[in-house]
Image (cartoon, rainbow, N blue to C red):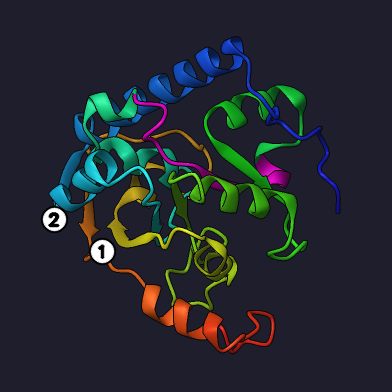
Amino acid sequence: MPLEVKWPFPQCPRLGWRISSSLVMGMVGSYSYLWTKYMNSLSVHNKDVLLDLVDERPQDTPLITVSNHQSCMDDPHIWGVLKFRQLWNWKRMRWTPAASDICFTRELHSRFFSRGKCVPVVRGDGVYQRGMDFLVERLNQGDWVHVFPEGKVNMTEEFIRLKWGVGRLIAECSLHPVILPLWHVGLNDVLPNKSPYIPRAGKRVTVLVGKPFTVKHLVDALRAENKSPVSGTFL
């Protein structure tokens, strides 16, 4: 199924695009910082691990963060845990896949979400599609990509099968990314999955930052054996 809008990312972004994208990222990040941290009660465990990886990892070390998905505004609300200056650092902030049938149905919406470093992914088109190719390219530039492996808002909060798009990002990234798991509780109270879809205040939000790891040795070994990711014997 093709995108309903034209591909939103220019091959060589002009200055105007970069400035507008920086403004969108900074303003949305500032809202998240205010709303999650000050309008609600935020508790973050192991926060310095995330902050250090955003700030201090080498330029040739990409970062993949993965988390559960409770509400349609988990991203950007979860990034209220970051420092204010990080939210305005366009280069250091995350890219993330976003459902094309929600965020990219109109050109105006497409301009906004793409400038917020959201990448359109078409449901049902599998892991080999343009949006996923773009994210692999970003990782190969040493960037940060955040993924919700559940692939949808998990309103029942049951354990469900994880989508294997994150496996492709890891397998095809040439720079061996650092992988950091996150788990959050309470963001579905900040924005409940029922109307009216208005962010709430006075809720308790907890974010657990896990231990970073890599799978370099596993990926290198499977590549050496010429294993195929499609066959299920790679990741």
The image shows residue 157 at horizontal and vertical percentages of: 42, 69
Q: Which residue is mark 2?
A: 46
Q: Secondary structure at mark 1?
A: loop
Residue occupying the point 49% across, 42% down: 95
93 vs 17, left or right, is left
Residue occupying the point 59% across, 48% down: 137
Judge whether 167 appears above or below 146 on screen: below
Residue occupying the point 69% across, 80% down: 230
Q: In which quadrant of the rendered view does residue 40 lie?
A: top left
The image shows residue 48 at horizontal and vertical percentages of: 14, 48
Q: Is residue 82 visible?
A: yes
Specify start and end residues of the magenta stretch as a single range.
Answer: 89-102
Classed neighbour count for the residue bearing mark 2: other residues with Cα under 10 Å, few (<14), some (14–19), many (≥20): few
Q: Secondary structure at mark 2?
A: loop
Task: Inspect the magenta stretch and tell me whether residue 94 lies in it.
Answer: yes
Q: In which quadrant of the rendered view does residue 30 lie?
A: top left
Q: CA distance from mark 2 to mark 1?
A: 11 Å
The image shows residue 46 at horizontal and vertical percentages of: 13, 55
| Lower position in the chain sequence, tag 2 or tag 1 | 2
Q: Which residue is mark 1?
A: 212
Q: Amino acid at mark 2?
A: Asn
Disc 2, disc 1: CB below 8 Å? Answer: no
Q: Amino acid at mark 1?
A: Pro
Name the one closer to the observer, 136 or 6: 136
Assign the N terminus to one quadrant of the image. bottom right
Name the one closer to the observer, 139 or 107: 139
Task: Inspect the magenta stretch and tell me whether residue 206 lies in it.
Answer: no
